[in-house]
Image (cartoon, rainbow, N blue to C red):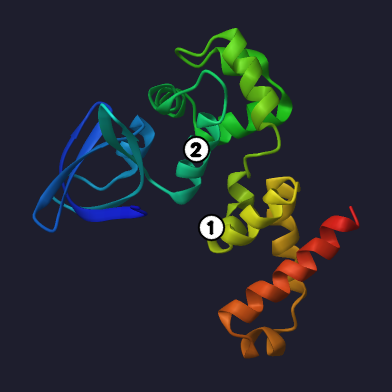
Amino acid sequence: MFNSIRGEITGKRSGSVYILCGGVEWDIAAPQPDISALPDTGENGRLFTWLYHRDDQMKLYGFASEGRRATFLELLKVDGIGPKGALKILGGISQDDLETALEAGDLARLEAVPGLGKKTAQKMLLALKGKLVKAADAAPESRYGDLVQALAGMGYDRRAAADAIAQAEKSLPPGIAASLTAAEKEKQLFKESIVILSSL
């Protein structure tokens, strides 16, 4: 429904940001690191958003990047973690540390996150290991998010899918790549990525 909101930052407080856009001032809940990454009050900023809607509540959540929002959505898939809990986790550990802890199976590091107990940390390890793409590998996902999602839907690991797309893109001859439309390029990359992933 909403992908992002860009406008004048009219206020920052613990856990939320006010953004004025088109005459409407939005109150957006956000992790503290994402709030800190925004420009100062009075300047323009952008948050990638997700709308939480229930019969008795509607709340807008915002993140500094699409990758941060994707991490938030992955956290919501873990049993016992709701929007407030996911926001608290993202506020208590950096993106790099979270991804590293999940990949290394570092339960102690996850348990050190404020408000995250042992049982929930264990559930996170089981549910999310291999699901979060490292920041260094995030460029292909930010540009080809639909492709990564499609490959993940076929059962491939998200990081492996992002790596395969990057490898497929590098292997395209410059002349051919320049002659393809965006849709044709994505189709070609999808085919090549499946070949690469199948050979692993």
- Give 79 or 197, whichever is nearer the viewer: 79
Viewed as shown, does residue 37 lie left or right of 24?
right
Residue highlighted by disc 2: 73
Viewed as shown, does residue 95 lie left or right of 23?
right
Residue 189 point in image, percent of width and height: 71, 70
Residue type at mark 1 is: Ser
Q: In this view, does 168 lie above or below 110?
A: below
Residue 99 point in image, percent of width and height: 61, 34
Residue at the extreme top of the image, as rendered: 118
Question: Which numbered disc, 2 or 1, marks the residue closer to the eye?
Answer: 2
Q: How crowded is mark 2: few (under 14 residues within 10 Å), some or many (20 or more)?
A: some
Residue highlighted by disc 1: 142
- Give 76 or 116, whichever is nearer the viewer: 76
Residue type at mark 2 is: Leu
Viewed as shown, does residue 37 lie left or right of 124?
left
Residue at the extreme front of the image, as rendered: 55
Q: Closer to the N terminus: mark 2 or mark 1?
A: 2
> Which element carries disc 2, helix, strand or loop?
helix
At 66% from the left and 39% from the top, the residue drawn is 131
Q: In this view, does 27 lie above or below 93?
A: below
Q: Is residue 155 above or below residue 143?
A: above
Quarter holding residue 123: top right
- Give 83 or 139, whichever is nearer the viewer: 83
CA gap between label 2 and label 1 equals 15 Å
At 54% from the left and 9% from the top, the residue drawn is 117
Q: Residues within 10 Å of mark 1 (few under 14, many from 20)?
A: some
Task: Give the total of numbered labels.
Answer: 2
> Which element carries disc 1, helix, strand or loop?
helix
- Give 152 or 107, whichever is nearer the viewer: 152
Residue 72 point in image, percent of width and height: 48, 36
